[in-house]
Image: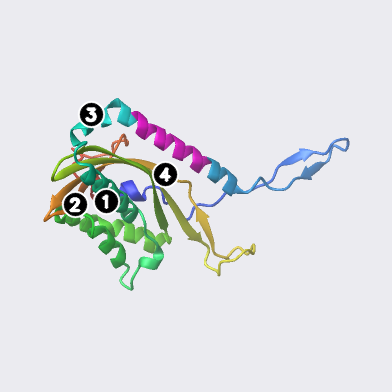
Amino acid sequence: MSVLTDLARPGESVETGSVETGSVGTGSATRYPERPPRWRTVLAVALTLVVVACLALLVWLTAGGRASADGGLDHSEEREQVMSLTDQFVKRLGTYSPDMLDDSGQMPDYRDQVREVITPKFAADFDKEVATAEQLVAQGGITRTADVFATAVSSVDDDSARVLVAGAFTDSYSQGTGKQGSGQGSGQARTVDQEPLPFRFTVDLVVIEGEWLVDDFTPVSAPAEPGAGDGTTEGSAP
């Protein structure tokens, strides 16, 4: 699950401040207003990440991602189905919030929405790892959303397919314990937005009893984690 939870860092403080400079002709220090709202910087970063992710996907496809796609040109219906399912899968896997928690600290709706689009084999791995996301949400108040920028079919036949997908995860968390609002009280709760985290995955799909389902997914060009092994379970965790 580290792939889909490594952006969240609850409890970090947000840096704010002011700029001091000498007043012209007086030599005294004048405190100017704070920097422009942080959302402008976040928006600029987010837009840059969107462009970079999409360009990376295009380069990836040009360099060989479509090497086997020509053989699937006759499967136009299947291509549409697997791209649509990949879009659903990524959004379901990367969307959760404290509202989904039940009294036991689990997210049953989240579990169900992911299981609906994955194979039983993948579901077994997912069930072993989903507690990581649930713990993060319960302890840190994390809300995560997933945006899909582009999908492309790498290969497809009658009962299997591989789809390439690029997008970004965006996290936010609640800071403070008071009631949310616009005041400046130190104990007042407020929502802190993290910068978007771009991703690129290959998603493997198979047909089971006439239905396309996701069988696995693998991050592309992601740094290897210590002890990652052969990577056969890289896509098993949110």
Report crowding for label 1: few under 14, some 14 to 19, many 20 or more residues within 10 A (C-alpha). Answer: many
Query: Circle 4 is placed at which residue position?
Result: 197
In whole angstroms, how far apart are the C-alphas of marks 2 and 1? 8 Å
Among numbered discs 4 and 3, the one appearing first in the sequence? 3
Q: In the figure, 42 relative to 183: above or below?
A: above
| Magenta stretch secondary structure, dominant | helix
The answer to whether marks 2 and 1 mark residues whose Cβ atoms lie closer than 8 Å is: yes
The answer to whether marks 3 and 1 mark residues whose Cβ atoms lie closer than 8 Å is: no
In whole angstroms, how far apart are the C-alphas of marks 3 and 1? 22 Å
Among numbered discs 2 and 4, the one appearing first in the sequence? 4
Q: Residue at x 32, y 56 (%)?
A: 92
Q: Is residue 141 visible?
A: yes
Identify the amino acid type marked 2: Trp
Query: Circle 1 is placed at which residue position?
Result: 85
Residue 28, x across and y down, in percent: 83, 40
Report crowding for label 2: few under 14, some 14 to 19, many 20 or more residues within 10 A (C-alpha). Answer: many
Residue 129, x across and y down, in percent: 24, 55
Q: Which residues are magenta?
A: 45-59
